[in-house]
Amino acid sequence: MRGSRACVLFVLVVATLACGRRPGSIDISPKKARIYGVDSTQRLTGHVLDKKGQTLEQLSVTWSSAKESVATVDTSGRVTAKSEGKTTIQAKFEKLSAQIPIEVIDIKTIEVQPATLHLIGPPGMQYPLRISAKTSKGKPVDAQVTWSSLKPQVATVDAKGIVTAVGPGSTTLVAKLGDLQAACDAAVAFHDLARLELHPTTAIVRHGELQKFDVVGYGSDGKSIEGLSAVFTSSDPAVARVDAQGLVTTVAAGTATIRATLGSLTTEATLLVN
């Protein structure tokens, strides 16, 4: 059976050459590839072209990788990432060859922080989303993602992850990196805010303990508004770090000011670490 297939292929090649459509070049698509995550894959296609640039459908290429420790490629053109680094993938037919660069970046997972966002306040209020990316070994790493909003009429998100409230409603904000994807569910409600408060206003904790701060808003009518998503910062990350939800991780003994900002409003609380 295998011998019969070889004979058929030989006949097709001979027929092609006899008709004057001789192979002139090889075209690989895409022209380069960046693969995120060890064991992730990328499909390549390779076509033998005649001297007029037309595809010779009956002819197929063979594939090879310059560094199989970085990425391998099978007979169908499927590239599998093996380790972080760079290599080239070659397609060959008889004396013709072409190659493309491949880069493997070891980012296995990405997460958007926070995973849920409640923007309550005036139109145009903004909030910066954060990306948490990890390698295949669980090590944190920087990552540059592309952002999009499923409902821009509710909220938009720019290239830096800054969310801007546009209209009341709900949407999903999506971060993509290659085939990796993460999302944040965002809800927007317009409300007049007169001031913010952090609860507690003062916290005393021991080194190694966690402390949660909650932001509460107050309208011009004096009524409280809970569930706000504010931007938290620490005046001294060497003493205490704070995440997007207001959860503080103590680092060393000392004093730090925890700030929460929403639009033009800011409030502070004092953290004492013993």
Image (cartoon, rainbow, N blue to C red):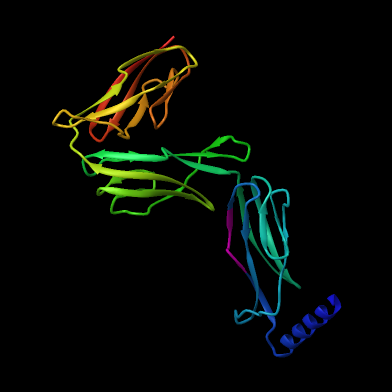
The part of the chain drawn in magenta is 28-34
Q: Where does residue 142 sit, x and y in percent of width and height?
A: 51, 39
Q: Where does residue 266 sit, x and y in percent of width and height?
A: 26, 27
Q: Quadrant of the N terminus?
A: bottom right
Where is residue 43, by image quadrant? Answer: bottom right
Q: Residue at x 18, y 37 (%)?
A: 192
Q: Residue at x 70, y 90 (%)?
A: 19
Going by the picture, which residue comes out furthest to the top? 274
Q: Where does residue 111 sit, x and y in percent of width and height?
A: 48, 41
Left or right of 19 in this view: 156: left
Q: Nearer the viewer, residue 239 or 197?
A: 197
Going by the picture, which residue comes out furthest to the bottom? 19
Q: Nearer the viewer, residue 203 or 102?
A: 203
Q: Nearer the viewer, residue 233 or 66?
A: 233
Magenta region includes residue 248: no
Where is residue 49, by image quadrant? Answer: bottom right
Q: Where does residue 75 sit, x and y in percent of width and height?
A: 73, 64
Left or right of 219 in this view: 6: right
Where is residue 188, by image quadrant? Answer: top left
Going by the picture, which residue comes out furthest to the left? 221
Q: Quadrant of the C terminus?
A: top left
Count the labels in the image: 0
Where 89 sits versus 242, above or below? below
Q: Residue at x 29, y 30 (%)?
A: 261
